[in-house]
Image: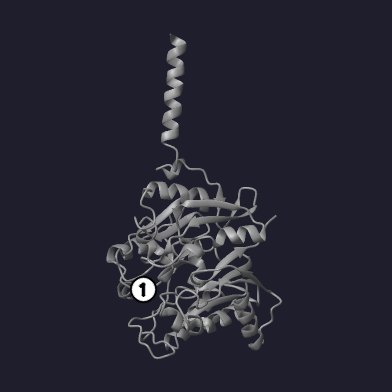
Amino acid sequence: MNILILVLLIGFASCDKENNAGPSDDPQNTEIIYTMPEETSEHEGTWLQWPHDYTYGAGYRDDVESTWIEMTQGLIKGENVHIIAYNEEEETHIINVLTNEGISLDQIDFYIYQTDDFWVRDNGPIFVYDKDDNLLITDWGFNGWGEKMKYTKCDIIPEKISSDIGISRVDLSKMVLEGGSVEIDGNGTFMATRSSVTNPNRNPNLSEGQIESILKENLGVSNFIWLDGVYNSDDITDYHIDGFAKFHDSTTIVCLNETDLLTWVVTQKDINTLMSAKNINGKDYKYVYLPLTKNNVITEWGKDIGYEGSYVNYYVGNKVVLVPNYADPNDEIANNIIQGLFPNREVIGIDVRNLYNGGGMIHCVTQQQPVAKK
């Protein structure tokens, strides 16, 4: 009889464990397995998805291609550039364009993958190290920012890259996460808006606690700064953090000032949260403020977009910092502030006026690949 009771108890315990399988609600009980290095760490290269006309029709590529040319020209000064081309015809076009601009192809390679669009920050691989310093690719779910845009081709890009470059992939498709929604300080702190991560249009079956556990396990973060963000807005991304706030290091946040944050439609509650944020050691952050553009952004073809541009969405390469510029009087002011933050890197202003018409800037269309430590 005692043996029978023991067997039954073991059976019930086993069933209970199986039924509750999945991410923990308590990130404090979650073990860190992988760690994402900060953007300022040394890169092997940068990934770009070159624009094309196959999703949105003729003229889409031509409107923004000059931005990709400028980015490529700057990045090859210090790292490789991995260009994703839609097909062989597009690859030939890109090679001709770069060659005509006098850009060397020595540090550029090409991968032929069909894509829906060019926002590689959001759909591309996020590289991490494991405890033995092996480099891996985390492959998160991507659903077109809550199924607002086409996404099925872009969703499988990390898997294709993993296969072709021989870096193992961690399948995290159980959770939707866009790279532009994530800011890390390199010392265990994570910053994001709930509207772009915990939003039911991304992760309806995961609690915030479960999401934090997954992030801790796979990005190596345990201190969470959550802003509410803005739900049901006109912003396709549901207010990605990289449009208005960015870690410079583990002690400093680069962001807009309070007046400009309000202009950016950041709520006073979120401003208070941002300005009172503490790092993993419980210390207050220092703040560096970048302006918005002085004027509304106007595209090269004369369209007034109707709002100002942000400079916070810059990208840090090995030798350069690519900063969104708008042919605006505040370009020089922002470039100089950022140059002060990175005295050993060259700040390059990249014209993003046409790209901004589609809702994004430099950080949105770049994705770093860290160096392999082993």
Question: 122 and 248: which one is in front?
Answer: 122
Residue 118, horizontal then vertical, whole percent: 50, 72
Say which of 237 and 309 sits in front: 237
* Location of residue 283 (image quadrant): bottom left
* Residue at (48% x, 43% y) in the render: 30
Does residue 305 sit above or below 373 in this rendering? below
User: Where residue 289 sits in the image (x, y, percent)?
Assistant: 41, 74
User: How far across and how far down the image is residue 326, in percent?
Assistant: 44, 85
Residue at the spot 51% in from the left edge and 64% down from the top edge: 153
Q: In this view, does 66 lie above or below 285?
A: below
Q: Which residue is drawn at 48% across and 49% down?
A: 216
Quadrant where the N terminus sits is top left
With respect to residue 164, does 72 lie above or below?
A: below
The kind of residue on which mark 1 rests is: Asn
Give residue 130's position: percent from left, percent from top: 60, 50
The secondary structure type at the circle numbered 1 is loop
